[in-house]
Amino acid sequence: MQKKRSKSTVVILAFFMLYGCFAALAQETYYMFSTLSGTEKGWEDGPLKSAKFWTPEGIAVDTKNNVYVTEYWNNTVRKISPDGVVTTLAGKSNEIGAVDGQGSEARFNRPHGIDVASEGSVFVCDMKSNTIRKIGTDGIVSTVAGLAGIEGSSDGNPQEATFNKPEDIAVNSKGVLYVVDTYNFTVREISTDGVVKTFAGMAGETGSRDGMGNQARFNMPIGIAIDGKDNIYVVDANYDESDNGNCTIRKISPEGEVTTIAGKAGISGTVDGPGKEARFNRPVGIAASKDGTLFIADTEADLIRKIDTFGNVSTLGGTYLLEEFADGQSWEARFADPQAIAVDDNGVIYIADTFNHSIRKGTLKQKKPIKVFMLAGQSNMGGKGDGSLLSQEDKNGLQTAKNNILFAYNRQYFGPLELTDASAYDSENYDLEKTFGPEIFFGIEMAKAFPEDQFLFIKRSLDGTSLYGNWNPEWIEAKATVMGEQNGPKLYADFQKYIKEVLSGYDPSEYEFAGMLWVQGEADSKVPAAAEAYGQNLQHLIKGMRDFTKKPELPFIIFQVGSGEVIKGMQETSKKLENVVLIPQSDNPASLDYYPEYAPPKSHYTYKGMKKIGERFAIEHLKMSDK
């Protein structure tokens, strides 16, 4: 099979990504998807990183975790060993034929489905040859059944039986082969002595009827798998033609009774839920674990799906109709028409990601609570770092961090960690288009340190605000008036309200407060009464946030800004309270504690200064967490 259609459905990606993050957080487990081998089209054996594939369309894994792959355009069968080496098991790249023989002497004509018997023999649907091939443990390729180049539906011995573009194959516990004979609309059985019979369906007759054996009807059955009890599962969908086909998952008992367990005949889509309510979009590949859990390559949808033993359908990875390439956690991963899937005895899934020309791997992970960091302060927490100066390395780091970190900022933005649009003031006075505060490089470093964790940064900042007035946990109008802030927001209370708003989409079991970052003090330094009270007010704020988060030892990191009594108050606070760290700074450019600022009359930290502040926050937090 080799069809590639344009995906016409419009996907609102930003919403889908955010929704995917929320949905995944409600699950106790998720899959981490990675690339096992192959990143560009071609044919090359060797180490995983340098090997190349061209439209892998079949995949299987044996009990020793060797992975076997068929390639439609290369006309080869490849093997990936557990020690990470890709070799060509049989066939020769880009040479078509129907020749039996040792390994590279053999020829195939658009091989597709593949499976491995318990004793190590590999069986292949050589689709365009209309034959079933075997690669013995000695590497010799032979024809099990079918007549090369002849289409038909005859049952009988190996020299008499014929097939019509068989697309997939599975081996049961007794060594009996089952083949989806796609263009005959049937499921065929090949006994251990090579005799072929039609097990289910009727050659030449399409439909979606359940029933025993030849009473059942299929419409282009295209994928097949067998569980530990020898139940057979069939993907009944039309990937090759304009018609979607049935888009259903069928089950055949060992006795031959066919039932529909998921999807509705003739209706495509991407609905999760109980089997009959679920919808698929031209699925092709299927794998079965021993307990009957099913994994589906929902090909046209660009998704990896699962059917649990209770019949519930869920999506494990990918974004609907978004044909891209990306590794990552379930909601981050992207696929391009994946056409085959396999599962090993440990539950690891392997995917032939066909139009990405790669072999992907999915590993089940236990979900950890999302780590919530609170960021607050005045203009230097808001940040005036110049986003246009990010290096390519910075941009790569931010791109990776986006997969791990959601960012909520001043009720103006909620999404993956990102630079922010410059305010009119910053645009006019600093000539900035995109700006950033400590969150960007703090996030980049946290994503490096905890690549499998998820984070949520909630930031509230307002230029020129004080702890004596706006941020005071014990706000009173008289103090706010001293600072000229009597008409301003009560930021301490507002910040807690904002945090509750952001977290309202989560169950409390799904997140944990990991720390708070504080950059504020300049405004208080200008007013003696505010400066003298700074230490006491800061301690009240820390204790208040710890009470709010119900974490008495919530890590609290202060970046030193301001002067005189304010700095003294910060120093006293960091000594008096447990789990409070002060990041000092120096005016000496040679000091490690120097953070570059804009030249007067401008103030605030430059790109380099803000980058260093974010990285320093990460360093101090990692020290506190013993990472």
Image (cartoon, rainbow, N blue to C red):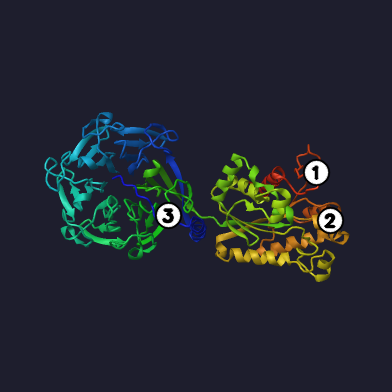
Q: In the image shown, does 369 or 336 lie closer to the viewer?
A: 336
| Disc on res. 380 | none
Quick one: label 3, few (<14), some, or many (20+) residues within 10 Å?
many
Q: Is residue 324 visible?
A: yes
User: Which quadrant: the N terminus?
Assistant: top left
Residue pointed to by mark 2: 525
Density class for disc 2 (Cα within 10 Å; few <14, some 14-19, many ≥20) is: many
What amino acid is labelled 3 in the image? Leu
For this view, does 526 lie left or right of residue 27? right
Q: Earlier in the sequence, mark 3 or mark 1?
A: 3
Looking at the picture, which amino acid does disc 2 mark? Answer: Ser
Mark 3 / mark 2, whichever is N-terminal: 3
In percent of width and height, residue 441 lies at 64, 46
Label 1 vs label 2: CA separation? 17 Å
Please identify the residue farthest to the right as the structure is shown.
Answer: 528
Q: Residue at label 3?
A: 316
User: Which amino acid lies under the numbered mark 1 shown in the image of this protein?
Assistant: Ser
The secondary element bearing badge 3 is classed as strand
Whole-Å distance between the Cαs marked 3 and 2? Answer: 53 Å
Viewer-side label of 3, 2: 2
Q: How far apart are marks 3 and 1 (CA)?
A: 50 Å
